[in-house]
Image: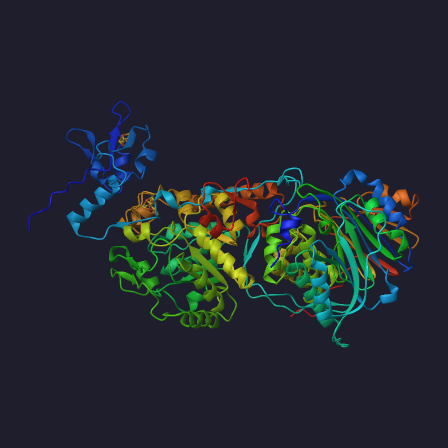
Amino acid sequence: MKRIKTYLQPEYVIERLKDRCNKCKICVRECTYNVHIYNPKRDEILSRDEYCVNCQRCVVFCPTKAIRVRKNPNTYRENYHWTEEVIRSIKQQAETGRILLTGMGCDKPHLTYWDRLLLNASQVTNPSIDPLREPIEIRTYLGKKSEHVNINYKDGGDISLETELAPQLRLETPILFAAMSFGAVNLNVHRALARAAAEYGTYFNTGEGGLHPSLYKYSDHIIIQVASGRFGVNAEYLNKGAAIEIKIGQGAKPGIGGHLPGEKVREEIAKLRMIPVGTDALSPAPHHDIYSIEDLKQLVHALKEATDYTKPVAVKIAAVHNSAAIASGIVRADADIIVLDGVRGSTGAAPKVIRDNVGIPIELALASVDKRLRDEGIRNEVSIIVSGGIRSSADVVKAIALGADAVYIGTAALVAMGCTLCQRCYTGRCPWGIATTDPEISKRIDPDVASARLKNLLQAWSMEIKEILGGMGMNAIESLRGNRLQLRAVGLNDAELKVLGVKAAGE
Amino acid sequence: MRDLSRISNPYRDDKVIDSCSLFGVIDLEGRRFPPKAPIKAMDIMSERVNGLGAGFAGYGIYPEYRDAYALHVMFMGRDAKGRTEEFLKKNLRVLMAEEMPTGKEMRDAPLIWRYFVEPKIVNDKCSEDSDNQIVECVMKVNNGIEGAYIFSSGKDMGVFKGVGYPSEIAEYFCLDEYEGYMWICHGRFPTNTPGWWGGAHPFNILDWSVAHNGELSSYGTNRNFLEMYGYRCTMQTDTEVIAYALDLLVRRHKIPIGLAAKILAPPFWNEIDSMDSKERTLYATLRQVYGGLLMNGPFSIIIARSGEMMGLADRIKLRPLTAAIKDNLLYLSSEEAAVRSVSPSLDRVWNLRGGELLIGRLRSVKTLEIPPVVGLH
Ligand code: SF4
Ligand code: SF4
């Protein structure tokens, strides 16, 4: 067969300002895609635009700020229906015959409801509270609560507590770090996440690739994930965390399994995952021992048995059409925590068509799950964590007002460490040293610096959450949970308002 | 099913918003007296009310029917009275029925009757059973019969309330003809309701009456929580959620009132963290399970039930509540001036601290003392 010439033009073009460039070659070293090359014969730096993913690594590190990465001005004729992205995708597939891969979360414009929701504040009839002067509490406990508390007492006599609560996770802020597996990211990233979680008083989720023994010291702040590949799952692993999460699905690729290419499976990773070096690590689409809800119940109980009922068990699902009914089943399968991951949820690698088209926005799924569990009177029996595109403290506050107990952040945490959302995590060459297991590139993440950046982010968001709460006249976060009266919507239709259980602004 | 909230909250706001004056007095010896002093005290606090609602709850006022439930019912619809009486006769034993004695005419006053009733089958061993039957009847009438509203349903007590200034309401119901050992009173300044007779305070269910001043920022969360336990917050007022919360905690979940107060206005986490281990577990468990009942935002409330008057303010004390003692009388009031107006010299007067429950019991006054926790496992 004849070789097919590519018709694809570079997406970005590099401009190097000649009067600034001092030919230090830093960009040549920093770029993991070999965009910048040095030609010693003519002593010049050249660019190969076609490899550029616009990760901005060279731009940040260029000492003379000589580099501009621009969108290639040579684009196709404007067309709302046949967009440039569509045309490029077709050409790429015509040239390769493959499924298009991508990384991170869905980037389509129409699915963010957070921005259509606005928050309330106190005026006149009740006072707002100043977080600089008064305590505002955002501590959160995750886990099964009882239907009621049994107190034994005689009037004027002794009081004794008869109720013993199921195990709880204590969070100093309602934000946890989402699952990112060792393999999808490298050990330095895990180190940074684990340390920041431990030092700030929250949790880090291992993802499905096991937990490196050097991180065992952070056990009290680690959530152990059990996914369909069951990589690295053994009794020791299960007992090395504060909680266990069964991953059924993920917002970036609901219904799809995982695939860690053999190149990324280096020795350490192979050891933890208990597979040979260099083999593909395949997570099946479903758990092959869970084909129905009673099977899930068995796994929940098996994990509780294995950990002597000392740890809450979470079940993570992608937000899909019947989330409310599924969530209700999960509560009845005895899970302590439900994790809902919305269509914006990120991944190291997913088919683009799945990432952008499967699943529903987390805001709508959360609203319907919280409502269903309340209607069934079982909301107390479970905590809800939501994830998938949480970008700011405002998103966190809105999520809690819609009914979440806490949120997971994945992408936001990576951005804090350096990620620029270039969406090329699946290449394994992340220029920021995150979504890569290459030992050299991984050094770009210094766990000390990265964990400080993560802690700063948690601190900043926590302070903002307190400001917002105080403005609403509340000094404890539990008073916001599911308090949709604190939300109003702009520009949504009646069906959306109904699902969200929120009034229109001005109403 | 009828939607009371349309009357109580006609503009469909998130809830009814109001501000108020509170006053309560109990004779700790149990001596009964007409509410002359409380009416005068309420008058002094006229700055806090706007004539759109006032009410009184008197305890010990019906000694002749001490063991019957006294139902005070408003009728606003044409055939509401007939249907209600039919319902009451079918489900309860009606010992006495009469129109509420009233004084001079008031504009928009509904027809008000009172009924002394007993459950048809009385289970001697289980008074709870009778209580539940009455609660069920109240809920059924209030949610099911158009134009009928039962606003008082306790034994040997009664609520009198309506649209007007406190003195007008007192005069309308001829309150000087009653004698009780305890009176709690409320004057209202609603901002978003035209005033509806049933919407005035105190709010009552069975033995409990609540008069409240404040606005709960946590209302949405509180309501969600209570709805999970079968309560329907039809009035959309903060007072209603406080009354239901107490009913759930104290009557249904058997939590001592002192601890129930620590659920509505809990200690801060750093206070809980520094408690000894048994107390810490107790308070942490209460906050974890009943976090949805934390009443967040400014409030002060006076709660009454047979033999007890209680006062509680939110945990950072954003609304006033003053307590005072003179001889055998314990007072609670939004303002000290109101107490002084009826009792110029006082033995003791003090402001309640945020989150502190004061209980005045017949023959004993004590601030909240929760005995040490024992027997944790
Ligand atoms: S990093 Fe900047 S200054 Fe150095 S060679 Fe590249 S473009 Fe030139
Ligand atoms: S993790 Fe790395 S590869 Fe993935 S989007 Fe961020 S910068 Fe790009």
Front-most of residues A415 and B200? B200
Vertical order, A132 against A19 (above or below)? below
Res B322 visible: yes
Q: Residue at x 53, y 64 (%)?
A: A376
Vertical order, A270 against A507 (above or below)? below
Relative to B18, A442 lies left or right: left
Relative to A102, B255 lies left or right: right
Image quadrant, ligand 2: top left
Q: Where residue A193 sits: x, y (%)?
A: 44, 51
Front-most of residues B195 and A254? B195
Q: Where residue B315 sits: x, y (%)?
A: 70, 49
Give the quarter of the image for residue B147: bottom right
Q: Residue at x 45, y 49 (%)?
A: A496
Please identify the residue farthest to the front as the structure is shown. B78
What is the number of callouts on the image? 0
Relative to B121, A91 lies left or right: left
The quadrant of the picture occupied by the C terminus of chain A is top right
